[in-house]
Image (cartoon, grey):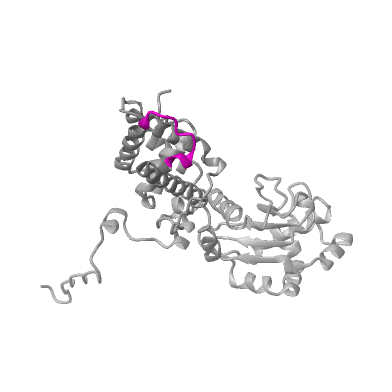
Amino acid sequence: MSEGFTDIAPPAAPASPVTADQVTHGPSIPLQQRILLYSAEEWEGFIEEWAHFALKSSYVQVQRFTGAGDRGIDIAGFTDAQKLLGVWDNYQCKRYLDHAIYPSEAWPEIGKILWHSFNKEYLPPRRYYFVAPHGVGTTLAGYLGNAAKLKKALVENWDKSVRCAITDTQEVPLEGAFLAYVEAFDFSIFDSKTALQIVEGHRQCPRHASRFGGGLPSRPAPDKPPADIAPAESRYVAQLLGAYGDHKKQLVPDVKALKAWPTLENHFGRQREAFYHAESLRVFARDSVPPGTFESLQDDIHSGVIDVCDDDHADGYERVKEVTQAARGLHLTSNALLTCSKPKDRDGICHQLANEDRLLWTKS
């Protein structure tokens, strides 16, 4: 060995065994780090998702404004049908690669709200939030926490940062009636949302898992079938009664008639439980995954069992049993809901399909 050189020590072993997921997907990246990779367009779309789903109880509509004529509005949440002439909140999306929002970058945006509301193009928003992957800087955060200081700093920086930045067609001097409007304006409406607040709120969005991974939330227990047949069950129940009648070679007019055959009565009870399991999965999918995911699972199961359904069977009851058994045995891998579905859900989906006459238990 040459003098002054030493061998590199072997790296320390991992503190815990490497998992298959780590080998396949690499190390987990915190969600707040992932959003730093978004383009400006992707960031606005992400905030639109967050506002629409996480804040849906607060607004009747969430609207995204794009293009040069947005008048200082990025994403607006409307609390009533009056929209910009009613009570609304603005979420101003800013994205910078390497820094939080500086005051000099916020002044023109605040100026636009002041100018356009002064000209009665809209009422001032109830709340105005800056939202950015890196958040707002320390200085701007201090201003946003003190309305008087915010107004004073804006006025002091108007000619430098705002006067020529509101429109492309004119300068906007801070004077006369407009100055009086600014002096009387409620600057406490201006605030910010942190990236952590946005990401945590986005967990309520059906697109959260598809954006960030990490699995779906826990699925609630399904409802028990009510004692009385609900109107939404009428068609699949009628189909089952027809299948039982085909099996017994006599009319089965209603559910009460099944008491004569305990095996069929028990089978019917299990099918209702399965239907309600599948309905609970439908509701869970509505709130947890992108639209169309549950319908795609229904289509996959339909494609997997339709040939079994169309085959010859001794009777309709045997057809029901063969089809539901085939559904439970399908090797499905792609649908996101498979991670939280159960065999009973597949039986229930068969009855959802029968409810829509996509599966028929009897030939006549």
Q: Residue furthest left?
A: 1
Is residue 206 toward the left or the right of residue 245 in the image? right
Would you place residue 213 above or below residue 3 in this image? above
Please determine whether, in this image, residue 66 is positioned above or below residue 197. Answer: above
Residue ID at (84%, 67%)? 184
Which quarter shows the C terminus? top left
- Which of 100 and 345 lies nearest the eye of the viewer? 345
**Quarter of the image holding residue 12?**
bottom left
User: As rendered, which of 314 and 24 lies closer to the eye?
Assistant: 314
Q: Is residue 50 above or below residue 309?
A: below
Residue closest to the far right? 176
Question: Can residue 169 be seen at all in this image of the molecule?
Answer: yes
What span is colored magenta in the figure? 247-258
Determine if the magenta segment contains residue 254: yes
Image location (x, y in percent) of residue 359: 42, 31
The x, y position of residue 176, in whole percent, is: 89, 61
